[in-house]
Image (spheres, rainbow, N blue to C red):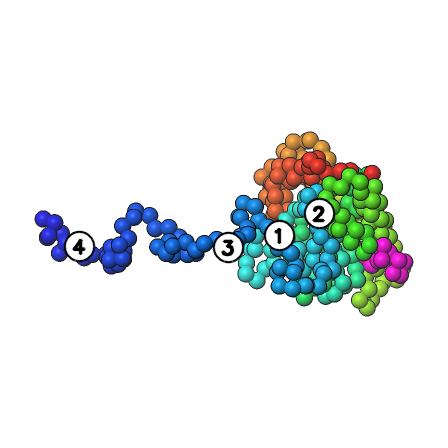
């Protein structure tokens, strides 16, 4: 019977090769770095252990090397200074040609390009940051970033727990440092000092607080002028557009729960929808609808970050059609669910081992 079965079922060539090689175990493991059939070579004297590695000095690693100009980061308390080209952030890629989707970070991000340009992608718009300008992205902001390899500059990651009591911008802020080169030098020195200091150094608490306060001062004085040779509207028309868009945002915030349309809000402001949209684009760079979406998202993040109101009540108060609508919109804009965002913000404010700056 066995002889007849062997003639009916042809032998598996893979199993035949394994049998010919003398392999008869039930599981094939991944190949090892060395042949286990050969005798193990004698370990050289002083060979470092995997469990207790030895740091090789510069002389042992092949001669002297030039000292890096980048200060060491402070991984112990989350305050890190890294090359801007190495800061890649975002959610999943929707398509091969599309950038990574925006995602919320739990720390503040300060970008300081000194060569090249980097594009910051937000849920409904993007911002080009050229060399010489500064951008501050507060914790809880959804964005994605993939700097080109040739861009030069630094990025400072700041835990919110180190910034208690500081008047940092609540929204993304960008611009040129004021006062010719004075603020630029002050910012560069503060960033370098924060990146080079040892983590959890209690003796340096006052210096850390002082340098973070200097950064906050520089950010408060940024010149947000457009630059780049673009045509500048007259001061009168720009002031009028700013006033109208400001009144629109105030009214929209007060009427979020009522769900009024932009046309209805424009009518209450005494203007047409086209006039309102033109004023919003002129003064704030986005359409009235985009500003309304951003306002609703901002109110949602503030409620989740600063309060304990249930998510369903927040969705109703902000004019979403239901909890599911709010969950989908918030996840699409931030890369996180409302519950995950609230947990991330609470963790950032109370992370153990971090010190207040003040």
Residue placed furthest toward the front:
45
For residue 9, the mark is 4
Which badge, 4 or 2, is on the more N-terminal residue? Answer: 4
Q: Quadrant of the rendered structure where residue 301 is?
A: top right
Disc 3 to disc 1: CB gap under 8 Å: no
Which badge, 3 or 2, is on the more N-terminal residue? Answer: 3
Question: Which residues are the magenta region?
Answer: 175-186
| Tag nearer the camera, 2 or 1 | 1
Identity of the residue drawn at 74% across and 65% down: 115
Which badge, 2 or 1, is on the more N-terminal residue? Answer: 1
| Residue 93 vs residue 218, the one in the foreground | 218
Rendered position, 257 above or below 24: above
Could you tell me how far apart the alpha carbons at marks 4 and 1 are, in whole angstroms? 59 Å
| Tag nearer the camera, 3 or 2 | 3
Identity of the residue drawn at 76% across and 63% down: 114
Which badge, 4 or 1, is on the more N-terminal residue? Answer: 4
For residue 74, the mark is 2
Q: Quadrant of the rendered structure where residue 354 is?
A: top right
């Amino acid at each position: 019977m066995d002889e007849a079965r062997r003639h009916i079922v042809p032998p598996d060539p893979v199993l035949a090769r394994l049998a010919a090689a003398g392999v008869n175990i039930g599981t094939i493991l991944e190949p090892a770095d060395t042949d286990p059939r050969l005798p193990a070579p004698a370990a050289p004297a002083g060979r470092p252990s995997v469990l207790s590695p030895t740091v090789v000095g510069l002389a042992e690693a092949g001669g002297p090397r030039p000292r890096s100009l980048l200060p060491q980061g402070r991984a112990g308390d989350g305050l890190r200074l890294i090359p801007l080209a190495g800061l890649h952030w975002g959610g999943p890629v929707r398509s091969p040609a599309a950038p990574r989707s925006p995602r919320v970070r739990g720390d503040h991000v300060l970008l300081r390009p000194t060569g090249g340009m980097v594009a910051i992608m937000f849920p409904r718009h993007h911002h080009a940051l050229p060399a010489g300008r500064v951008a501050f992205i507060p914790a809880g902001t959804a964005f994605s970033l993939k700097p080109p390899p040739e861009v030069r500059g630094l990025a400072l990651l700041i835990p919110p727990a180190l910034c208690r009591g500081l008047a940092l911008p609540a929204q993304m802020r960008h611009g040129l440092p004021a006062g010719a080169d004075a603020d630029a030098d002050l910012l560069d020195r503060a960033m370098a000092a924060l990146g080079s200091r040892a983590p959890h150094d209690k003796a340096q608490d006052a210096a850390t607080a002082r340098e973070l306060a200097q950064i906050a001062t520089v950010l408060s004085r940024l010149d947000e002028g457009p630059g780049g040779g673009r045509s500048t509207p007259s001061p009168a028309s720009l002031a009028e557009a700013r006033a109208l868009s400001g009144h629109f945002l105030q009214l929209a915030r007060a009427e979020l729960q009522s769900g009024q349309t932009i046309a209805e809000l424009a009518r209450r402001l005494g203007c047409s929808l086209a006039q309102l949209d033109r004023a919003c684009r002129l003064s704030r760079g986005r359409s009235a609808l985009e500003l309304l979406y951003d306002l609703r998202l901002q109110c949602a993040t503030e409620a989740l970050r600063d309060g304990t109101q249930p998510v369903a009540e927040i969705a109703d108060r902000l004019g979403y059609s239901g909890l599911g609508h709010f969950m989908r919109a918030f996840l699409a804009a931030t890369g996180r669910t409302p519950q995950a965002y609230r947990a991330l913000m609470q963790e950032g404010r109370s992370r153990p081992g971090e010190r207040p700056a003040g």
